[in-house]
Every structure is written in C-alpha cells, then in structure tokens.
Image (spheres, rainbow, N blue to C red):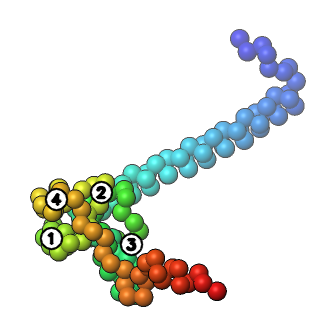
Amino acid sequence: MFDDLPEDLPRLETLRVWHTLWLTRIDAKIAAVQQRQAETEHGQRRRPEPPDWTVELGIGAGRPPVQVHAGDCHMAGKRCRPVGRDEARRLLADGLRSCTHCRPDTQLDIDLPCGTTPAPSPLPQGHQHDEYSTAAARRP
C-alpha cells in the first residue's frame, strides 16, 4: 500500500525522526494557540462594561472638561473620565461642547440653542490666539 517509502532501515529511521520532530512542533503550536484562545476568552469575559458617558479632558494642570461623549464613542480621546447621566446632562446644559459624532445631547434629550452644539470652551489664560497676538509674534 505505501510503496513509496524507502526499503533500507537507516532512511526509514531518519524519516521517523523527521516526522517525530514535526509532530512535536505541531503539538507545541496547537498548545500555544489553545492557550492564546483561552486567554482571549478569559479577557473578554472579565472586561468591564464601557461607561454610559465620558468627559474628554483638556491638556494641562487644571485639565478642564472639553467635550461630552457617549461611553462607546470612537472619537473620544485618551484623556477621558467616566461620568453619570446626571453629570453629563449638567455639563451639556452648562454649555460644554457635545461630540458631533455620537451626539450625547440628542441621546440625553438636551435641547441646545438653535439645534447646534455649544461653542468651544475658551482656552485657558495665556493660550488665547488672535490675529494681533500672532502678528506681533512674527515681527522681528
């Protein structure tokens, strides 16, 4: 049936060693893939639920809030903190900017003036730019 195998013992033993090595490598790879899958499933089961709402924070010492996002918004930056529904509504009502992608103002039933998002928060003192400050900075 398997006539394609060599007839002499040394070559048959070499083939046996070769295939034993390959089976060992394959078994090791199978074990590694199974371990990785088990770790991935474990991580997915233990992953915390995303928050309902987040506030994106600015840069700097005070880190003032900049924008409100839904908890699963892909446009939220890295500097975010979770907030509850009431705090998100309060921040939006106080004039904090609403994300234009996830529209938390719509989801929270906040009516903004003229159906637009509020104007961006002003920059902290010393960081404001206008045509006069930039022009003065360019003069020799």
| Sequence-first disc among 1 and 4 | 1
Instruction: Give the x, y percent position of residue 11.
Output: 86, 29
**Taking 131 as reference, is 13 above or below it?**
above
Query: Residue 93: which numbered mark, if any?
Result: 1
| Sequence-first disc among 2 and 3 | 3
Q: Nearer the viewer, mark 3 or mark 4?
A: 4
Marks 1 and 2: CB-CB under 8 Å?
no
User: Callout 4: few (<14), some (14-19), or many (20+) C-alpha neighbours within 10 Å?
Assistant: few
Query: Residue 100: which numbered mark, if any?
Result: 2
Q: CA distance from mark 3 to mark 1?
A: 22 Å
Residue hosting label 4? 114
Q: CA distance from mark 2 to mark 4?
A: 15 Å
Left or right: residue 39 compared with residue 85: right
Q: CA distance from mark 1 to mark 2?
A: 16 Å
The amino acid sitting under disc 3 is Arg
Marks 3 and 1: CB-CB under 8 Å?
no
Nearest the viewer among 90 and 81 is 90
What residue is drawn where x is 37% and y is 58%?
Answer: 75
Left or right: residue 51 compared with residue 33: left
Report the quarter where the N terminus lies: top right
Nearest the viewer among 78 and 30 is 78
Marks 2 and 4: CB-CB under 8 Å?
no
Q: CA distance from mark 2 to mark 3?
A: 18 Å
Instruction: Give the x, y percent position of residue 138.
Output: 59, 81
Marks 1 and 4: CB-CB under 8 Å?
no
Helix, strand or loop under label 2: loop
Helix, strand or loop under label 1: helix
Q: Nearer the viewer, mark 3 or mark 1?
A: 1
Residue hosting label 3? 79
Q: Nearer the viewer, mark 2 or mark 4?
A: 4
